[in-house]
Image: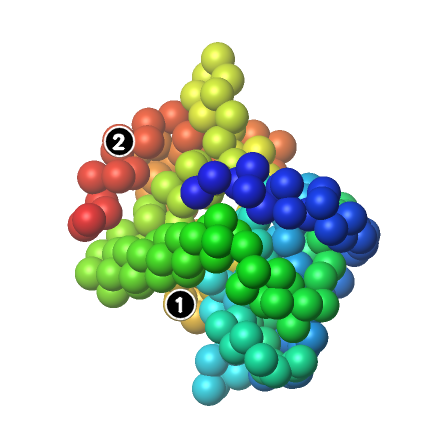
Amino acid sequence: MDKQILSDYLKKKAIPVVIRKKKSYLTYEGIPDRYVYILKQGIIKTSVVTREGREFNLRYLNDFEIVSLFKDEYSQEVEAPFNVRVESEEAELYKIVRDQFWTDVNHDRQLQDYVKEYYRKNLMDTMKKMQQMLMNGKYGAVCTQINELYETFGIQTADGVLIDFEVTNEEIARFCGITSASSVNRMMQRLREDGALQSVERKLLVKNIEMIRENIIY
């Protein structure tokens, strides 16, 4: 996607930026919301709550990207399909009244194309991840999530690729639909013993990403 199109729109319309602190929520699943948020800087997490009342994590976002855009072009408010929470110390976000945003989209062909591509990409990414989670079993699901963290937060160092964001085993369990964090602990220990992972100051250092990817069915 050509993010310059979105950037130019935000500048042209002088869309205001809001700052939210760590662990604050932008939206709650099922609660009406009347804004579109676009991440400028920081890290946020999307999640849903299962029927059993457990949280299931969807993804982390740490790049300039639309966070919450619900495909209802005419209502001033719509129910949020998921929770959105700030995970970095703070996050900067553009905040746009949603019906005004859709009016602007409908009058700008380039912006229309951008939004269509946004939906297409998010649908494909979601389908791919769900497929991996369903086909790989618990161990493969954990490896899938580590690979996603590697691609989202990975920084090359002399010793390997550092996942430059603290992620607990409890959070990994919520991404994988695993009820017990102790199960994730055992899988993570296995990866450490195999030499694929190492812990460095509460962060993960990936020593061998191919060894992790061998456990993922694509």
Quickly name the residue at label 1.
177
The image's mark for residue 91 is: none
217 or 215, nearer to the observer: 217
| Alpha carbon separation for disc pair 2 and 1 | 24 Å
95 or 81, nearer to the observer: 95
Decide which of tag 2 and tag 1 comes sooner along the chain.
1
Badge 1 marks a residue whose secondary structure is loop
Residue at left offset 65%, top offset 81% = 77
Q: Can see residue 58?
A: yes
User: Which image quarter: residue 12?
Assistant: top right
Q: Position of residue 212 (x, y in %)?
A: 29, 38
Image quadrant containing the N terminus: top left
Q: Can see residue 169?
A: no
Q: Residue flagged by tag 2: what amino acid is it?
A: Glu
Residue at left offset 49%, top offset 63% = 57
Q: Does residue 147 appear left or right of residue 14 in this picture?
A: left
User: Which image quarter: residue 179?
Assistant: bottom left
Residue at left offset 68%, top offset 67% = 100
Q: Position of residue 5 (x, y in %)?
A: 55, 42
Q: Position of residue 43 (x, y in %)?
A: 63, 47
The residue most toward the bottom is 51
100 or 20, nearer to the observer: 100
Q: Residue flagged by tag 1: what amino acid is it?
A: Gly
The residue most toward the top is 158
Residue at left offset 64%, top offset 41% = 8
Q: How is the image coloured?
A: rainbow
Quickly name the residue at label 2.
210
User: Which image quarter: residue 66?
Assistant: bottom right
Numbered label tally: 2
Q: Position of residue 60 (x, y in %)?
A: 53, 52
40 or 169, nearer to the observer: 40
Q: Are marks 2 and 1 in contact (CB under 8 Å)?
A: no
